[in-house]
Amino acid sequence: MAKTYLALGSNLGNRAQYLRQAIRALSRDNLILAISPIYETAPMGGPPQADYLNQVIVLETAWTPFELLRRCQVIEQEAGRQRIIQDGPRTLDIDIVLYERQMFSSSTLTIPHPRLGSRRFVLEPLYRIDPALTLPAGQSIESLWRQVQDQSVRLWSNDGSAKDADFIAAASRLTDSLVAADSLDSTNSELRRLWARGDAEDGMAVVAEQQTEGRGRLGRQWISPKGSGLYVSVLVQPQRAMDPLLGFAAAVALSETVSAVTGIKPGIKWPNDGVIMGKKYAGILVEASKTPRPHAIVGVGVNVHGSFGNAVPTATTLDQATEPLRVDRTVLLDQFLRRLAYWIGIWQQARNAEILANWRVFHVLPGAFVQIWQNDVALMQGRVKDVDRYGHLILDTEGGHTHRVTAGEVSVRLADGGYAPIPH
Ligand code: BTN
């Protein structure tokens, strides 16, 4: 696997749509490690033409540089690119900027990109997603970026045309083992029905545009309006004893995906709530059963578009966190399913320590003073230390006692009434 940086540009037609199309197409066969914000820039060189939208993405790829070049050219052609005028306007341009630490030049491809150092429209997004990056020859991206500050680029704010109205149609093309529906009672329930009928195999996923009876933990409802969220469930046939670490594995997969796709570092609030800036953006519900055969359904709900306003003051959405840029649910789903498959594989091999080590990177509760609630009764309070190897929460309570709390029936509140700590 190789790490590669690509620069995307468009200045014809629906520019943002072409950038999204490129990311979706690349997302199909590669792991996305980061996506930069979009910048708008005046054209450099060539005939008079409209302003460009520019973006940089980082991929982990199995393709060689020349395969990657060919794939990028195919994606450019699919976007209707015509090479008539040199340096002329284009629907989509994809340049390979860096490929691992490689340096080479051929008639068709030079890496690092030869004009990288003179273009702020590449250096700006590159610096934003990887400020510590150095080029193979040793220069830092920061020093190059400082040298081009006389060129102007503007952070581009989305005009709303980025609504992913085609989400379910796009999702249904992602893989054969994914069922995409406009409306379901609950994706967990649908997957359970498919499984009971013998129509679902290990790894099968169900996604819906809306849920009419979305379920959360502790018998709560999961609000699942149309066009706003990601509601997805995945079937797991355990090859080992069930344990809560399956939910932890899913939380790691989700957090890594959100970090790559939005550039925001999300948090996890024990047991497995996704949080950003002290508010909940995602939840995970694992439903396991031994009948008719042992299976578990991992259900994940992510608030993506819109906002909850004052209606639910403890909830937020990814779009609120990434404003003015909007998240593409198809890319989010595609990338999440890849990472989830990886982390479920780790769980199947009982590599619990690895899951916990990666989970702790995101955990926001250590050090917080919390109360443990069950059925609207506060059971105890104390300072969060950590989680143990079973995923139980370790609390230091008054009098120097240590308590271990299991996730099953309880929820955690901050003692000051807040929902989750806000990172400094
Ligand atoms: C929580 O309470 O934090 C867990 C919420 C889980 C919601 C998801 S949405 C997809 C799947 N289907 C459901 O009915 N629930 C889960």
Image: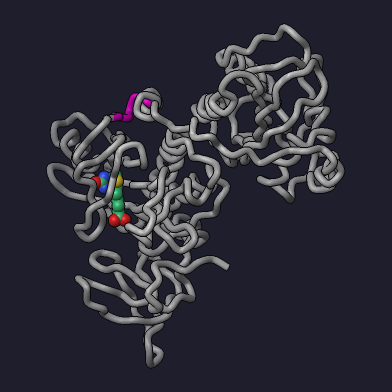
**349 or 320, nearer to the observer:** 320
- Between 325 and 335, the residue placed more toward the observer is 325
Give how far across and how far down residue 208 sits, in percent. Answer: 29, 35
In the figure, residue 30 lies in which quadrant?
A: top right
Q: Which residues are magenta?
A: 175-180
Identify which residue is drawn at 50% across, 55% down.
266
| 184 is higher (above) or lower (below) than 378 | above
Instruction: Note whether residue 297 is visible.
Output: no
Query: Percent position (x, y) of residue 40?
Result: 68, 34
User: Is 23 positioned to the left or the right of 218 in the image?
Assistant: right
The extreme bottom residue here reads: 399
The residue drawn where x is 44% and y is 40% is: 336
Residue 269, compared with residue 146, is above or below; it is: below
Q: Is residue 231 left or right of residue 92?
A: left
Is 19 positioned to the left or the right of 421 in the image? right
Position of the N terminus, as image quadrant, is top right
Say how many tags the image has.
0
Residue 23: x percent and y percent?
55, 29
Above or below, 73 against 423 in this view is: above
- Image location (x, y in percent) of residue 92: 63, 20
Residue 163 as seen in the image, left or right of residue 10: left
Q: Residue at x 70, y 26 (%)?
A: 51
Q: Which quadrant of the view contains residue 304?
A: top left
> Could you say which is closer to the camera, residue 158 or residue 30?
158
Q: Quadrant of residue 399?
A: bottom left
Depicted 19 relative to depicted 353: above or below: above
**Residue 31 is one of the magenta-drawn residues:** no
Colour theme: one colour
User: Is-magenta flag for residue 176?
Assistant: yes
Q: Looking at the rendering, in which quadrant would you find the C terminus?
A: bottom right
The structure residue drawn at horizontal position 23% and vertical position 43%, both measured from the top left corner, is 188
Residue 36, can we see it? yes
